[in-house]
Image (cartoon, grey):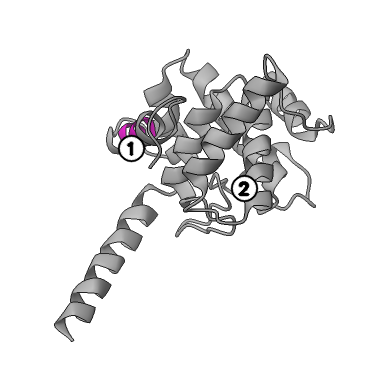
Amino acid sequence: MRRFSNFFLVLAALVFTHAAFAGGQKEEPLSNSVKALMQKSISDQATPKTIFASEVEGQIWLKEMSNRLKIRMPDQDMREDFLRTVYYEATRAGLDPQLVLGLIQVESGFKKYAVSSVGARGYMQVMPFWVNSIGAPDHNLFHLKLNLRYGCTILRHYIDMENGDLYRALGRYNGSLGQPEYPTMVVGAWKKNWSYGSLTF
């Protein structure tokens, strides 16, 4: 009985810890030019495609990342579709796809339908106010491509706002600007688990 009690205490602690770092971007006024750029980025209907230096390089990356993600996302087709979309949306926004994987790991634990205590949704824990600000009323933040499109566009916006300072940008993304825990967790997950060529976990 005590073993089960300890198990549930550990589980509760893990859930609480995860919830403490889930997305909570703060709504801030956007200049008209920034808003227009972000709206254009969100509404772009170009067909997603993974762009690598060569097809062979692309297959190697996909296989490597798929092996690392298998324990968290067992379905191979879903996993590969997810990874292709991450790669496309990240590179499209000028982000390192492995950084985005680290952020998703911390934000949602790769749970498509994750909802935080403050209402952030999906893989990248996007706050619903962004739909009103830069999106369209019919946008579903649990949709894979849309969630990643919003998340990558928002992170790019914060990086630009912070003149390339990734730690401050990550703090803004999480709504914890000035506190080191969240940026440290994301960069740690990126470097430990997703840095290309590192050991699988």
Residue extending furthest bottom? 1
- Which callout, 2 or 1, points to the residue nearer the camera? 2
Q: Residue at x 46, y 38 (%)?
A: 103
What residue is pinned by disc 1? 185
Camera-nearest residue between 1 and 53: 53
- Res 66 label: none
Q: Quadrant of residue 93?
A: top right
Q: Residue at x 39, y 28 (%)?
A: 198
Where in the figure is residue 172, as x and y percent of width and height?
Answer: 44, 32
User: In this view of the protein, which residue sits in the foreground, 52 or 15?
Assistant: 52
Name the spot of residue 32 as percent of width and height, x first. Answer: 70, 23
Q: Nearer the viewer, residue 64 or 89?
A: 64
Give above or below for 76 relative to 180: below
**Residue occupying the far left of the picture:** 2
Q: Residue at x 78, y 27 (%)?
A: 40
Q: Which residues are magenta?
A: 183-188
Q: Earlier in the sequence, mark 2 or mark 1?
A: 2
Percent across and percent down for residue 107 are 45, 46
Name the residue that disc number 2 marks: 79
Prevalent SS, magenta region: helix
Q: Is residue 68 above or below residue 114?
A: above
Q: Position of residue 92 (x, y in %)?
A: 68, 23
Query: Do we see residue 138 in this rendering?
Result: yes
Residue 187: in magenta span = yes
Q: Residue at x 78, y 32 (%)?
A: 48
